[in-house]
Amino acid sequence: MKFDVVIIGAGPSALALACTLAKTKLKICVIEKNSRNKFSKPKNDGRDIALTHRSINILKKFGILKFINSKAISPVKEARILNGNSPRYLHIDHTKTIKDSLGYLIPNQIIRKAIYKKIKTLKNIKIFSKTDVLNINSNNFSSKIYLKNKKNIESKLTVVADGRLSKIREKLGIYTNKTNFEASMTVFRMKHQLSNNNIASEYFHYNQTLAILPIQKNLSSIVITLQNNKSKIFLNLTKRKINQKIENDLKGKLGKMNLIGKKYTYPMLTVYSNEFFRDRCVLIGDAAVGMHPVTAHGFNLSLRGINILQDEIENALINKIDIGNVNTLKKYEKKFRQVSLPIYLATNGIVRLYSDQKPIVKLARKSLLRLANTFWPVKNAVIDELLLKNS
Ligand SMILES: Cc1cc2nc3c(=O)[nH]c(=O)nc-3n(C[C@H](O)[C@H](O)[C@H](O)COP(=O)(O)OP(=O)(O)OC[C@H]3O[C@@H](n4cnc5c(N)ncnc54)[C@H](O)[C@@H]3O)c2cc1C
């Protein structure tokens, strides 16, 4: 079997790239090790994905946004970042901008369903499910992809989108910078007595990080990050104790809290690939950059990377050059590194700063938030990032 582009993985990054490349008329194939049900009817995974205006525009451009019901999109009007129980906070407000919100929250399950609905309308994409990729070999003309079912596929360009623990990245010999924070993030939804006023809040306590993401007036997504040993204890608490704990942690700001539905837990391991391509294979999504979710950048970055790669592939097609050529992939690598590396390093730096208990670090984080709140260049940089200036 021969294809122009083979994409390994059928996660949101892989399928979003397939959607946008479909219009080029390239022959595209997606290979996923799980059954079709897993990506065509994705289950709730508890994640409410915070998307920037830039990402919403990219989803619109890829033809995906129209498959998302507007009722499933929750606007975030303000963001507050607090240091422990201090009443001061870093305040970012949409009224200082030309937009009517800072960004939006959409359940991951809904984003994934929308991407699949778009895929179903496209003719030049073939999906092989329950198919595991074992290895890849490339030469000057093509790559050969070896499958577990003993078949193989040839492609001009292979896109590796098999997630942050990517096995294919390893097979290609690409090293990564990995950080295991020995912590877990648990996400769940809570109803509450008082309105959240569309405000997203992030509380950096000394032994936990707690984020409140506004879904509806009296419904929020709660994101709690704890060291692994503390996380185990938290997961064993009764519903009544969790309600009480979050109510206490928030000092009753949202009134009575009521846990609804299941809790979902994720290990906090971040990954940054040293190379974004090797031979005819290019890395996207979490396989390229696996972010700590505390700054909600993972899928936003992935969409920016896909947008860059799509532009470079289209340029190659316009200039009638091989889509897997080194220069095309080098340009993608350079541009995506410029966008992703500062955000990756800053996010890991924030996580370290806000989980370190040393007195000097505690003092530094207090001063940093105060400085950021009064020093407009810092605030403006955050707002620019959210509102797609410099895109
Ligand atoms: C708790 C949490 C909250 C988050 N919140 C936000 C947020 O607010 N904003 C934001 O932008 N991002 C957020 N993210 C990040 C976002 O969810 C991820 O960046 C995104 O889901 C990554 O998608 P992906 O397609 O790159 O990888 P994945 O979803 O990991 O997909 C990889 C796919 O490859 C398949 N695969 C693996 N190996 C093989 C193989 N050998 N052969 C074939 N197929 C294979 C897998 O089965 C899977 O389907 C959050 C993440 C977490 C954990």
Image (cartoon, rainbow, N blue to C red):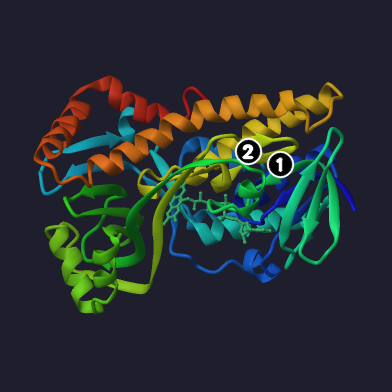
The residue carrying pointer 2 sits among few (fewer than 14), some (14 to 19) or many (20 or more) residues within 10 Å by Cα, namely many
Instruction: Pick whichever of labels 1 and 2 is earlier in the sequence.
Output: 1
Residue that label 2 marks: 306
Instruction: Find residue 171 and report its horizontal and vertical position in percent.
Output: 66, 49
Using residue 234 as the reference point, say whether residue 75 is left or right of it. right
Quadrant housing residue 59: top right
Query: Do the numbered discs 1 and 2 sit on residues whose CB atoms are within 8 Å?
Result: yes
Residue type, mark 1 in image = Thr
- Number of the label disc, if any, that sits on residue 298: none
Q: CA distance from mark 1 to mark 2?
A: 9 Å
Count neighbours of disc 1 (C-alpha within 10 A) and say few if under 14, some if 14 to 19, many if 20 or more.
Answer: many
Pick the front one: 257 or 17: 17
The residue located at (46%, 31%) in the rendering is 341
Say whether residue 27 is left or right of residue 100.
right
Is residue 37 depicted above or below 366 in this figure? below
Q: Is mark 2 within 8 Å of ligand 1?
A: no
- Expressed as whole percent of the image width and height from the top left, the position of residue 202 reads 26, 48
Give the number of the disc on residue 20: 1
Tell me the quadrant of ligand 1. Answer: bottom right
Task: Give the foreground label among 1 and 2.
Answer: 2
Is residue 287 depicted above or below 320 in this figure? below
Q: Is residue 64 visible?
A: no
Q: Residue at x 54, y 54 (%)?
A: 165
Residue 311 pos. (x, y %): 69, 29
Secondary structure of residue under mark 1: helix
> Above or below — where is 277 with respect to 171?
above
